[in-house]
Amino acid sequence: MSVMVSQSCTNLLGLVTGDLLNYPQPVPRPLPRVMTVPGIISDFDDVDDRNNGALEALSSPCPERKIIVANQLPLHAQFDESSRTWNFSWDEDSILLQLKDGFPSDVEVIYIGCLKADIDPSEQDEIGQRLLDNFKCVPTFLPSDLETKFYHGFCKQQLWPLFHYMLPLCPDHGERFDRSHWQAYVSANKKFADKVVEVINPDEDYVWVHDYHLMILPTFLRKRFHRVKLGFFLHSPFPSSEIYRTLPVRDEILRSLLNSDLIGFHTFDYARHFLSCCSRMLGLDYESKRGYIGLEYYGRTVSIKILPVGVHMGQLESLLDLPETSSKIKEIQEQFKGKTLILGVDDMDIFKGISLKLLAMEQLLEQHSDLRGKLVLVQIANPARSSGKDVYEAKNETSLIAERVNEKYGYPGYEPVVLIDKSIPLYEKIAFFVVAECCVVNAVRDGMNLVPYTYVVCRQGTAELDRAMGIPPGTRKESMLVVSEFIGCSPSLSGAIRVNPWNIDAVADAVKTAISMGDTEKHLRHDKHYRYVSSHNVAYWARSFDQDLERACRDHFTKRCWGIGFGLGFRIVALSPNFRKLSVDHIVSAYRRTSRRAIFLDYDGTMMPHTSINKTPSAEVISLLNSLCNDPSNTVFIVSGRGRDSLGDWFSPCASLGIAAEHGYFVRWHKDWEWESPSIAADFDWKQIAEPVMRVYTEATDGSSMEIKESALVWHHQDADPDFGSCQAKELLDHLESVLANEPVMVKRGQFIVEVKPQGVSKGLVTELILSTMSNSGETPDFVMCIGDDRSDEDMFESIASAVPTARDLFACTVGQKPSKAKYYLDDTVQVIKLLHGLAAASAQSPKRPSLQVSFESAA
């Protein structure tokens, strides 16, 4: 069955991707120079795993490997006109390259991504082989029209603005959702997946996918290799659910991310927003276990990692030691001699808040005339990473404000704002960092932003730089930071002055405070920042993520996996190896060879779908139950949480059917028998305490409701706001446990409910009691079948084995493929009815033997 489902998903994923767009999807080519001996391919995985040519085995041993997948490779590409050839070199500034320092030296790192160059199709094969041989890089070549719609379309015009909290409310503020751009995004992700398939050894290699360009790549990889060891790290912000839920393809992206084993975020806020989206849109709960946050998703635990990336200390220190750097530092010091230099280094885009920073500078000079002629803001504007109207407007606004401030407060020989709107060498930026007494990072929204970290390291300097600059050894360093509350690095910089970038007055005051602060305070703040930045560098970040990914993948081969779902809704169900589908033929065979049988059936979700509005059993269900009850070898019980009046009325046509209502508090063996209760205290005075408390929470929580049963009280919050409902449920649980501490009741929290019921009442206990009663009456069953669908039924599954250890055949069966104490499953209520048809057909139609004269007292 699992193979058939997987095959259908393959076809649908193909339809979702390239075929819709007419983009060619080439057959993945094996790359023998990278391939190593694959591990044993599990029998439970997709049959395609055994047939793909890319998994051709070689006889060499395989070293540990990490496959890093990102939109762009960490390479520079330059075309040599004279030789008409392409030259490639490492991009030393790329985090993807720097993170290798966090891996052991014997780990082989493979990079997959696009080149920052337009390679002619006729050269792609040759260049691909060169990059593989020389750099361990596998380039993904996208057709130009696909790349335009994928990167400049969906990534930059849809995801990037939305993730930075900008909604396309009108055409002037972002582009509306374009289905063709989404299809290009899907197709491009599929091409990246094909490249991973070419090189991966699925049982051994770890795959680490980076950033929002490839958020649906996990689905393609998980579809292809059910046990792929897969991590994903988002380098941008993740918006609140109110923003994210406006995305038309929100569910597809969420479910694709959940096909990872580990999902990383820079800050807790971003992780919290992601978890809230999973809760509100997919109904998933999360919990923290021993310090690790995990989401349970169809039997798999998806771990959440919260850790900001760091800078590469070695690279920065080597740049600080360059003669060009010290020379440039002296030049800058001479240029701004006698002036206080504050610095901004930002990309030219609408979210970096450059214009707000310049307005704050204008406000500062307006309020403090003594700073005129003494204070200079050097704003380095890196070239924009995208193009469009937004970028043009941001650039134009920045230039106009800079010109206005300089005209208003400048004079010959003094410009309060120095705008460097061009690409400059990295060592030159480093020199400005060293000289600046304060760094202002004013972004209105930014995923991480490493500028403050870089500034702190540069202000610390090195021994070599100190010698070049004539600074005495042991001189204490100082630095001051003014950072926006809305950037990812802000929580880790506790010594910085945090500001709301939209509050111009507050930013101006913060800069004034920073430059006028005492030296001792500056030293203390700088030392605190440097200790953190130097210890939490990029290697620390990569090593920590890698260790958590190994932990998250530790139990991959202890469970059996099924692929279910269509298209981008594909996901893996991971269950115990002993968990299998209940075959009708198998259970009918056992049914026929046994002489005394006990059958326990839940109702809602087992014989009646949860989605059904009319909960009255159909004529078919009544007929099946009567057929089973009329077999003299059978004792059949409906075990439900519903009240006895509803169940008694619905099943009145079934004279011989046993019913256990309200999770077993009320039991009757046949229609004509009186309802019995277990021998526990029938004191319900506790209701007078619990009911007023529960009513308060019902009134205070919109969408919640209270159900009053004869033996229990239940508070439902399925229709309430997910976060608020969950919060109120936790508080109600604590409140009820406190006020009912001395009462003979138990307070239990379930899925969207909080329930108070007498101690000693559960489906498991009533099942044990019924089986014990049968045994004490000389009718010990040798066949026991129990079918249910929710958490309360798990008690039954666990109890039947201990209650009748001598039974020849035990069948605990849950409805739906999900983690369970049952050993069998059926897909849905339709299959449950089909199974009951099989048993009814096998039953002998002999007259019913005299009923057992049983009661709970006889069981005792």
Image (cartoon, helix red, strand yellow):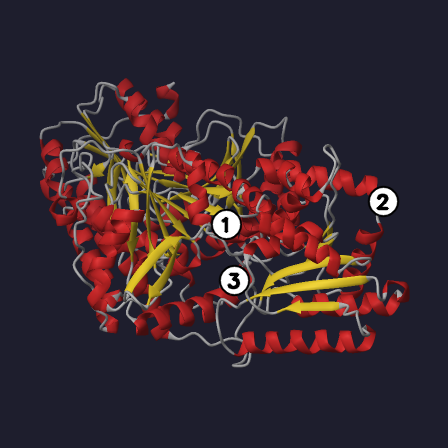
Decide which of 790, 461 is in the foreground and name it.
461
| Amino acid residing under circle 1 | Leu
| Residue 560 located left or right of residue 610 | left
| Amino acid residing under circle 2 | Gly
Decide which of 322, 183 is in the foreground and name it.
322
Is there CB contact under 8 Å for labels 3 and 2? no
Q: CA distance from mark 2 to mark 1?
A: 43 Å
Sequence order check: which comes first, mark 3 or mark 1? Answer: 3
Mark sitting on residue 163: 3
| Residue 680 located left or right of residue 831 | right
Give the secondary structure at mark 2.
loop
Residue 424 locus on image (x, y percent): 56, 62
Decide which of 774, 14 is in the foreground and name it.
14
Residue 365 locus on image (x, y percent): 84, 67
Is there CB contact under 8 Å for labels 2 and 1? no
Give the secondary structure at mark 3.
helix
Instruction: Name the residue located 39 percent from the left edge and 27 percent from the top edge.
Output: 765
| Amino acid residing under circle 3 | Phe
Residue 483's place in the image compared with 739, above or below, is below
| Quadrant showing the C terminus | top left
Q: Residue beneath label 1, please?
A: 275
Instruction: Name the residue located 20 percent from the left edge and 44 percent from the top edge.
Output: 33
